[in-house]
Amino acid sequence: MRDDSKELLPRPLSRREFLSATCLVSTGVLVPSLNPLWAAGGVTGHAGEFGELNATDAGGIDLYLEHKDLLVGGRPGRAIAINGSIPGPVIRMQEGREALIRVHNRLGESTSIHWHGILLPFNMDGVPGISFPGIPAGETFTYRYPLRQNGTYWYHSHTGLQEQLGHYGQLIVDPAEPDPVGYDVEHSIILSDWTFEDPHRVLRKLKTMEGYYNFQRPTLANIDDQMKATGMSLGEVLEKRLAWDRMRMDPTDIADITGATYTYLMNGKAAHENPTFLAKPGQRVRLRIVNASTMTFYDIRIPGLPMTVVQADGQNVKPVETDELRIAVAETYDVIVTLPEDRAYTLFAETMDRSGYARGTLAPRQGMSADVPEQRRRPMLTMADMGMMMHGDMNDMNGMNGMNHAGMDNDMPQHASGGGHGKELATTNLVERIGHGPDRHGPASITMGQMAYRRLDYPGAGLGDDDWRVLSYGQLRALKRPYGRRPPTRQFDLHLTGNMHKYVWGFDGKKWSESDMIRFQYGERLRINMINDTMMSHPIHLHGMWMDLYAGAEDYADNPRKHTVIVQPSELLTVDITVDAPGQWAFHCHLLYHMEAGMFRTVAVVRSLEGGPIDVES
């Protein structure tokens, strides 16, 4: 899963350099020598200057990976550049043809590229230690795989924390058949987060002090602000704060890493650089939006323009018009917008914790801009986010706590890995909530709501109170019935667990180094019930196979197909999987630092549940 990476730290100042610099600062003198010394060799370009390549053209393409000094938001930063920039080039491919991509590693350390959401042979998937050894320094690895799908996807490193340094880019697979989505012009929108700190230092800080980057916690100084914002009295605010304090929890624990260190980027550009996307009034504009961040959820809107969602995670969906949508790390959405008049509109991507934003302009001409919306107040988690429901629901919850799931109906989640094996499981009207039960899931899990329940129509903390339409999973419906859609015959529960005090994350209370492989049987139709025992939303990604998301559709064929799903706090979320891909695959939270801290599993596709992975070479 991971390789050791060299830390990219500036070299220490000598005593003479330190004294010289501090004397100049004390006298107010600013000279070029005060720039970071590691950047003294010269910055050769700006982030965001990337092109486009076609990997299914004759002869394929070449990608060159190297450390490079680039200006990120106007400041010099040390990046992993792909063909000279971050993001890397947009890579186009054609469905029905074969991609040929040569990756040349000039980093001085091992690296990799994972083709996120692409169905391919497991040894082309690009996960070191799982599907291949990695690409050693100074060597070239050739990726070659057929394209069996179309849509908007992305690519990134799966080695250590390299993704945080700019090792990512967008993929577009053009359809072999006529595209059901009509549009006149398209633009790639690649959202990401950047820190000028070394990523390994960031991880150490998270492990050293809980909430290291959270400067939005409730304090005595902001108690008056909370009273005004919520309409509560002083006593009510204090009572609420004490309730959270007794649980040793923080209602503002929305994001582990915030704008305290992050610069938020759109196509490699900071908000003040304002990248522009051109379209004429009346044109149908397709925005292919990828969240290539390491840790940041974005809430996206274009004030004054409705967006019509036409694709989620590369899969066509029945059009849904909305005013705002939340996009998790690793998700993609395609939306259609139409400029009604000859003026500029702001494409606004506000972070979920409200500590910053990325921004661009959609306009008929370069040089135009529109007002930037005022940032909203940061949200606070509620007792419902902790699985502590109110009124009559609380009585139902208490009655269910500690019940043995094995004695419930077959459409209830079951803790045994073989639950429901051999019998078709229900595909509609699944149970809406379950009590947590007696299992505490080990020392790596310290937060457990009493109840997990479906939250398909909940857009997320901080959304839905502005009288705007906000997209939810419950609105997503597949445009056409996906292949392989049949009822599952086996299911198991998977608890998402974490310990924020120690910054340990995992599944079922275990981090990756302590866990066994999860076995999928080749050819089966499998159900996984994900239960989030933590206070945070987790984007869960399965490599190599689609997850059919139970979104409450009356017709099983209508449920959307995704490669990454958000599991919200205290949520019970169900996915069904057609196990049709032999080999070993990664299954993990796509928050990079959560994955690095243990929220990762290896999935082995086996011929029998007692056996080892299928040897795909035989």
Image: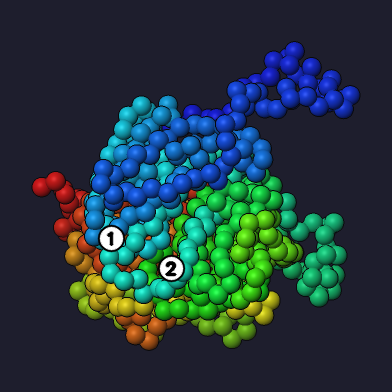
Of helix, strand and loop, which one carries label 2? Answer: strand
Q: Is residue 130 visible?
A: no
Tell which residue pokes out farthest to the left in this image: 618
Relative image position of residue 167 (x, y in whole percent): 47, 42
| Residue 38 or residue 93, whichever sits in front | 93
Place of residue 451 in the rendered image (x, y in percent of width and height, measured from the top left):
52, 73
Q: Amino acid at mark 1?
A: Glu
Q: Is residue 12 above or below residue 210?
A: above
Question: What is the crowding at mark 1: few (fewer than 14 residues within 10 Å), some, or many (at least 20)?
Answer: many
Instruction: Say which of 548 and 524 sits in front.
Output: 548
Q: Nearer the viewer, residue 22 or 240?
A: 22
Give the left or right position of residue 420, taking residue 350 as reference.
left
Disc 2 vs disc 1: which is toward the camera? 1
In this figure, what is the number of numbered marks?
Answer: 2
Residue farthest top in this picture: 16
Residue 312 is marked as 2
Q: Which residue: 10% across, 47% down?
A: 618
What amino acid is at disc 2?
Ala
| Residue at the spot of label 1 | 95
Residue 556, given in percent of the width and then of the height, sits at: 33, 81
CA distance for labels 2 and 1: 18 Å
- Residue drawn at point x = 69 percent, y = 76 percent: 466
Q: Helix or strand or loop: what does disc 1 sit on?
A: loop
* Residue at figure coordinates x 40%, y 54% from the top left: 171
Tell me the quarter of the picture where residue 610 sits. bottom left
Q: Is residue 368 visible?
A: yes
